[in-house]
Structure formats: C-alpha cells, structure tokens
Amino acid sequence: MNISVCMIVRNEEAVLKRSLQSILDLVPEIIIVDTGSTDNTKGVAREFTDKVYDFIWHNDFSAARNFSLEKATKDWVLVLDADEVVTFFNSDQLQNAIDQSEDIVGRIKIINMIADSTGEKRYVERVGRLFNRKNFHYEGIIHEQIVSLSGSSFDRVPLEIVVEHIGYTAGVLKRTDKITRNIKLLELALSQTPDNPYLIYQLGKSYYMLKDFQRAVGYFKKTLVLPLNFSLEYVENLIESYGYALINSGYYSEALCLSKYVKYYSNSPDYLFLMGHIYMNNGMFTEAVESFTRCIGEKESKAEGVNSYLPNYNMGVIFECLGDNGRARMYYKLCHQYPLALNRLELLK
C-alpha cells in the first residue's frame, strides 16, 4: 500500500508506543518528526522506525506537519498524533478510495475521550487525515488545516478507519498543559488574521475546556456575528458548545436564541439534545420532551448516549419533577444500565 504515516511528537514517551504498535503492521512506512523532546520519545520511536527526524520548533504546527510530509517516500500520507490509537482499519476500502482520485481528503473517525465532572465520555468526530502529499499541504500555525496546493475544490471521503484519541483526558491535559499552549498559539494566529472565525471558535473552545465558560461565551458570540458556512462541522460544534457554555454560565433564557438554528440542524441528535437541555432549564417541559424524543434513533450522535439513554434519562427527570412517577420510571427503565437512572429507580421504589 502506497501510504506513509506521518506524526509530529514532543515528550510523548508515555503514549507513543501504544500508538505506533497500532499501526506498525498496517502501513509500509512511519515518519516521526520530533520537535524537541527531552524524554525518551525518540528512543521509543526508533523501536518502530528508523525514519526519525528532528525539527526545530518555532510555534507553527503546519511547518512541522509539512516537514514530515517532505520526509515521506510514499505519495499518500495518513497523519496521526502520538496520543491516537488505531482500533479499526479497512485496508480494502482505503485502497479503493485512493484508486478513485488523487484529489480527495480521506476523513477518519476519531473517538475523543474527554473528561468532565462525571468521568470520561466518548465524543465522535470525522477529521480529514489522509491525502496525496503532491496535491495538499497544511496551513495555519495552530489547528492546522489541509489545503489544496492548486487551490481547486476537492472531495472529502469517509474512510473506515477508527482512532481512539486520549489527548483530552484529565491526566494527559495536566501532564502536557496542552490547552494553555493552544491559547497562546491561537492568540498569535489571531493577531495576524483577527477576523478568522475558525480561530476565534477554537479560542472559545479552549476556554470551554478550561471550564472558563463566561470567557468561552464571549468568543463564541464573537464568532457567530461573522459570515459562517453552517454546513461545516466546526460551525455545528460552535453552536453546541455555545449552548452548553451559556447553560453552565446560568444564561438560560439567552440560550433560547439557539432555537433559530434548527433549520440547519433539525436532524442532528446533538443539536436536538442541546435544545432539550435549554428548554428544560427554562421550564419549557413540553418543548424539552419533544426535542429529547427526536434525539432517539439510529442516527449517529457525536457524544455517546445522546441518541439513546441520555434523552430518556432527562425525560425521566422531567416527569419526576412534575410528579408523574409512573412515566418517570418508564423513561428511567429505557436507560437500561445507565447508573444515574438506576439510582433514580431505586429512590422511586
């Protein structure tokens, strides 16, 4: 298979081995670019490949990414991070995709393990990670984007590749101070392009992950007044993150303004779940139940449980608050083994 895996690393000895083990037998070439490790990262990398290169870091992720592309000897590259582990890889489907056209970007499924107050949750997203290095490169010093070298349009193709990302778990964030680093780079990038909605969104998202919800609200609100393409995934995530930041800041009535985006996301379980929460916090229980009901089904949600047990649990809470314990028990039972629902059922005995 004419594919190189390209990875940039720095002080990743704790996670790198597991990542490289997951891809070692799947691709013929692994390129590792180290941007200044002070631990045994390069030693771990050399257990799996002799193509380990040094790159002087100067606060530019795209520069490091593009250097790794230059070192690849295969035309097609699959870009991974050291804290990502490949759990599924359909070689036949991948080969078929790259045989169709050189002007495509393959989008892999990434399962993010994100820590919050209730533990770790799975959040699913599709991200462009596979492309022909003769036709594409990276731009942007932070949250770098794949860009066509010719400037022409290209197709984004879903690939049957699944990756588990552990970089946003509490332990990893504490060890790497990743969010603080990102904020500094985002502020630097915004000083050059102050009206870039994607960068403003990412800055808001960084403060959201730090649980500085009021500051996140400010950046999300600033993004929403700029011209946006509501078909882009980051814009949908912007709407959802803005909603939860408003809820966490206690701005319940202000969050009702997000109902106007239903024309874009009427089939999105994640958006409908958010709106259910917003209605619930505003005492609009009929609207909340309707929105939660529409979440449930076969359509894949980005956040785990949003299309199944979580809306059922919230409807159980609503009916319990309304004194309808019979319907509350019914919805709690539909949550199956969800611990919070089991606790409520025990208390309603």
Image (cartoon, rainbow, N blue to C red):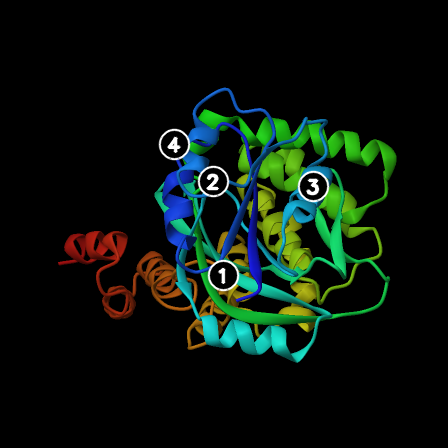
Distance from disc 2 to disc 1, alpha carbons, whole Å, reads 15 Å
- Label 2 is placed on what type of residue? Tyr
In the picture, measured across the screen, residue 17 lies left or right of residue 302, that is: left
Q: Position of residue 65 (x, y in %)?
A: 67, 43
User: Which one is earlier in the sequence, the residue at label 1 or at label 4?
Assistant: 4
Q: Is residue 219 above or below residue 108?
A: above
Q: Are marks 3 and 1 in contact (CB under 8 Å)?
A: no
Q: Nearer the viewer, mark 1 or mark 4?
A: 4
User: Which one is earlier in the sequence, the residue at label 4 or at label 2?
Assistant: 4
Distance from disc 2 to disc 3, alpha carbons, whole Å, reads 26 Å
What SS does tag 2 mark? loop
In the picture, measured across the screen, residue 86 lies left or right of residue 202, that is: left
Distance from disc 4 to disc 2, alpha carbons, whole Å, reads 14 Å
- Label 1 is placed on what type of residue? Lys
Q: Which residue is mark 4?
A: 14
Write down the quadrant of residue 267 in the picture: bottom right
Q: Nearer the viewer, mark 4 or mark 3?
A: 3
The numbered dot on residue 67 is 3
Residue located 48% across and 69% down the image: 286
- Label 4 is placed on what type of residue? Ala
Q: Which residue is mark 2?
A: 168
